[in-house]
Image (tube, rainbow, N blue to C red):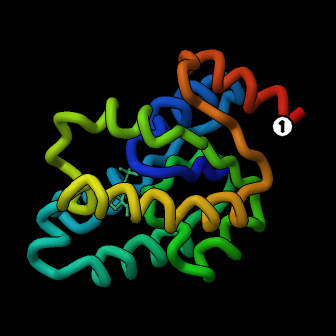
Amino acid sequence: MIYLIGFMGSGKSTIASRLAEKLQCSCIEMDESIEKQEGLTIPEMFAQHGESYFREKERDFLRSLEGEAVVSTGGGVILSKENCEMMREGTVIYLHAGWETIVHRLKNDTSRPLWSGDESEKKQRFEDRLKLYKEAAHHVVVVDDKAPEVIAEEIAARLK
Ligand code: S3P
């Protein structure tokens, strides 16, 4: 299993589908799969049941994975040590996007409950998580100013 991790807006879903095509394996989008299972969108889950409920579903979903696939995770998957341990049984790739890139990409985003609050709160969340992404990863790929195809190629080369 190959897990793509990284902050919101780092391009995990786009890269995961390109990489899965290249490797000719399936692609799993965790957030989308959890939304389907629950019959709720992520903002609805957060609003109705709270973040901890979503985190439980996220952990259960990871536990249920088997076989070979490229998995696009949610940005907060690394908040749980258990999740990190599960993912490290496969290969974990951290897509590192700099703060400016994230801000630019999520400028008009209203679909992410944790992309909220003032700028300093968001930046703090980003900075607090950097260490966790790096610790969880087998490989770090910098994504700033690179096309998805180039990034997918870079990852495929590292996996050889
Ligand atoms: C989250 C990131 C989201 C989603 C949820 C929580 C986070 O996924 O799982 O809103 O804690 O960073 P993306 O990274 O795909 O935006």
Read off the residue under disc 1. 159
Q: Position of residue 28 (x, y in %)?
A: 49, 47
Quadrant holding the C terminus = top right
Q: Is residue 101 above or below residue 47?
A: above
Q: Position of residue 159 (x, y in %)?
A: 84, 37
Quadrant in the picture for residue 155: top right
In this rendering, does residue 38 appear at all?
Answer: yes
Q: Name which residue type carries label 1.
A: Leu
Q: Is residue 66 above or below residue 49?
A: above
User: Viewer-proximal residue, 135 or 57?
Assistant: 135
Residue at image position (33%, 38%) is 103
Q: Left of 113 or right of it: where is 158?
A: right
Q: Position of residue 2 (x, y in %)?
A: 68, 49
- Quadrant containing ligand 1 reads bottom left
Using a 10 Å C-alpha cutoff, classify the residue at mark 1 as few (fewer than 14 neighbours), some (14 to 19) or many (20 or more).
few
Q: Left of 20 or right of it: where is 56?
A: left
Residue at image position (55%, 16%) is 147
User: Viewer-proximal residue, 117 or 19?
Assistant: 117
Residue at image position (56%, 25%) is 18
In this rendering, does residue 36 appear at all?
Answer: no
